[in-house]
Amino acid sequence: MTVYNFSAGPAVLPKPVLEKVQAELLNYQSCGCSVLEMSHRSPEFEGILNKAEQDFRKILSIPSDYAVLFMQGGCSTQFSAVVYNLVVDLDKPVDYIVTGAWSKKAKEEAARLGLKVNATTKEALEFSKDPSFIYYCDNETVHGVEMPVDFVDKLPKNIPIVCDMSSNFMSRPFDVTKYSVIIGGAQKNIGPAGLTLVIVKKDLLGKFAQCPLKGPLMLDYKLMADQGSMYNTPPTFAIYVSGLCFEWVLAIGGIEKIAALNKAKSQVLYEGLQKYPSVFSFPVEEAYRSRMNVPFRILKDGKPNEELEKDFIKGAEKLGMICLAGHRSVGGIRASLYNALPIEAVEFLVQYAHSFALKQ
Ligand SMILES: Cc1ncc(COP(=O)(O)O)c(C=O)c1O
């Protein structure tokens, strides 16, 4: 049975990538050992890291005045890293656009560090007079809220913009130059868990040393940039597999192609479920519905029904469609449609949803 993995992360990886990992696992390019065993200072690993960075830059058209950092600690660690690296005056506020669970957590971390935090919404967009930065999450993984790609244009131009792209990184083209810092865990749309990607405008490097809060050295973007992400032992295997994922994206046609596939997949799902408005409902208003994480509820007599949702998930599992349960904080169903999920998986899910709806 083919298994289709709708997990929100760690998530499905491209099959050709897994096959390559398998083929190279014991003896990487005839060097006699596995990437798992390799020194991060070896020429082989340096080659892997450099190629991964080059390909990532190529996919997202990252200009040379931006550094790409391969870090650890997940995106949760970046919630404090952005503070240490951008704040030099604790009296200045920091502004957070709260759109769901992850931007809320990021905001709470800044408050925990003692910052003056101003929270606003995507509708109000009420900003402080002179904040150290404005922060938002491009795609809320739990709530399925994705910002339109031009959302960034609604924000003030002269304030550093920080964006969490954990769950829609590399899913569509966007203009890197509109941001100061972009952060994201790899384990959703890029590669395996253990690697955290940071894109940072080089002219911002160095503020870590001026921040009155003394963060761990490991979170200093300048140090990481100066050391080529090799200040300490990087997550070598996760970088290697992510590098293969970058090669895969380029081989299938790059970011435009990936974006077209992602749009097609989410359209198939939303349109397929919309045919049964008395059975399936979407919690998110249409303009902000995510292409990556599609949450929906199953209704009985017009109300979400947990029993029916359990049946739906169980029935899907029997057919090989796994990890469809919504996040434990919100319940319902959530289908994550990351880059590596084939469109056949979505078509199969829609076909199943169709037969499920007809039985209600
Ligand atoms: C949008 C978003 N931001 C941040 C995080 C936290 O990332 P990590 O688990 O890598 O710390 C997640 C994790 O699911 C996420 O989806």
Image (tube, rainbow, N blue to C red):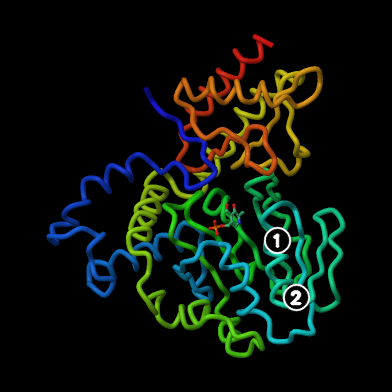
- Against 109, is 5 above or below? above
Tell me: residue 106, above or below residue 13. below
**Residue for point 70% across, 49% down:** 148
CA neighbours of label 2 inside 10 A, class few (<14), some (14 to 19), many (20+)? few
Type of residue at label 2? Answer: Asn
Whether pointer 1 and pointer 2 mark residues with C-beta atoms closer than 8 Å, the reply is no
Residue 51: x %, y % from top left? 34, 64
Q: Is 33 on the left or on the right of 294, as rendered?
A: left
Q: Which mark is residue 158?
A: 2
| Measured Cα–Cα span from mark 1 to mark 2 | 16 Å
Q: Look at the numbered disc 1 and give the secondary structure of its residue.
A: strand
Residue type at tag 1: Tyr
Quarter-wise, where is residue 325 in the image? top right
Residue that appears at 46% across and 67% down: 72
Report the residue at 44% width, 41% height from top.
12
Ligand 1, what quadrant?
Answer: bottom right
Residue appearing at x 78%, y 60% in the figure:
154
Relative to 241, 271 lies left or right:
right
Q: Answer with mark 1 or mark 2, whichever residue precedes in sequence.
A: 1
Count the marks. 2
What residue sits right under mark 1 in the picture? 136
Q: Is residue 348 above or below residue 171?
A: above
